Image (cartoon, grey):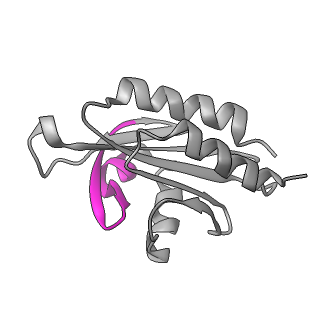
C-alpha cells in the first residue's frame, strides 16, 4: 500500500502536467514532491504568505529564484504573476495550504504556469487537487 505522500505525488504528476513547476512540502519544510531543485531557503518564506495580506503583497512569492507579485490573497490560496516580462509571456504562480496534509501536519502545494495557461484554470486545478489529493 502506498503512503499518502507518494499518492499525492503521483496525483500531482497527473494533475499538473501543464505546469512548469510543482512543489509539495509540509510544515517541517520537508519536500514531498518537486519537479525542480528547490532552494531550501525559499520554503519558509512561502509559508508566511498566508499571514498578513499586506506583508504577502509586499514580499511576493519566490519560487526557483524567481519573484512573483501577489495579486490575490485569499487563504488557503495565494497567487500572482511574474512582472518582469510582457503580460503575454509572464508566468503565473499559486500556492495552496491544507491544514492536515499527507504527513499529518499542514502542507503546501505550489505551482507555476506559463501562457496559454491562465490563473482562472490553474488555480481551480490547484484548489481541486488540494481538497481531494492532499488529505492524510
Farthest-out residue, left: 86
Does residue 93 appear to the left or right of 22 in the view shown?
left
The residue segment tinted magenta is: 54-72
Residue 3 is drawn in which quadrant? bottom right
Q: Relative to residue 35, is residue 97 depicted above or below?
A: above
Percent across and percent down for residue 95 are 49, 45
Q: Relative to residue 88, is residue 90 depicted above or below?
A: below
Does the stretch in magenta take in 59?
yes
Does residue 89 appear to the left or right of 97 in the view shown?
left
Q: Which residue does the image show at 37% across and 53% down from the upper left?
A: 55
Q: Which residue does the image show at 38% across and 23% down from the upper left?
A: 120
For the residue pair 54 and 115, the one nearer the viewer reads as 115
Counting every numbered tag in the picture gives: 0
Q: Which residue does the image show at 19% across and 43% down from the upper left?
A: 90
Percent across and percent down for residue 13 are 57, 46
Q: Relative to residue 116, is residue 107 depicted above or below?
A: below
Residue 53 is drawn in which quadrant? top left
Q: Do we see residue 123 in this rendering?
A: yes
Q: Relative to residue 69, is residue 120 depicted above or below?
A: above
Percent across and percent down for residue 24 are 59, 55
Does the stretch in magenta take in 58?
yes
Q: Which residue does the image show at 44% across and 41% down from the upper left?
A: 78
For the residue pair 23 and 27, the one nearer the viewer reads as 23
For the residue pair 9 and 120, the one nearer the viewer reads as 9
Percent across and percent down for residue 89 are 15, 41
Q: Do we see residue 101 in this rendering?
A: no
Amino acid at each position: 500500500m502506498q503512503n499518502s505522500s507518494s499518492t499525492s505525488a503521483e496525483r500531482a504528476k497527473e494533475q499538473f502536467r501543464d505546469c512548469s513547476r510543482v512543489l509539495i512540502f509540509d510544515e517541517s519544510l520537508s519536500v514531498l514532491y518537486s519537479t525542480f531543485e528547490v532552494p531550501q531557503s525559499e520554503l519558509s518564506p512561502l509559508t508566511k504568505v498566508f499571514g498578513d495580506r499586506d506583508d504577502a503583497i509586499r514580499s511576493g512569492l519566490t519560487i526557483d529564484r524567481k519573484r512573483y507579485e501577489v495579486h490575490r490573497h485569499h487563504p488557503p490560496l495565494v497567487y500572482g504573476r511574474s512582472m518582469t516580462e510582457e503580460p503575454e509571456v509572464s508566468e503565473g504562480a499559486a500556492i495552496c495550504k491544507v491544514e492536515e496534509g499527507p504527513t499529518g501536519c499542514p502542507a503546501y502545494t505550489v505551482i507555476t504556469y506559463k501562457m496559454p495557461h491562465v490563473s482562472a484554470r490553474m488555480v481551480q486545478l490547484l484548489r481541486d487537487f488540494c481538497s481531494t489529493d492532499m488529505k492524510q
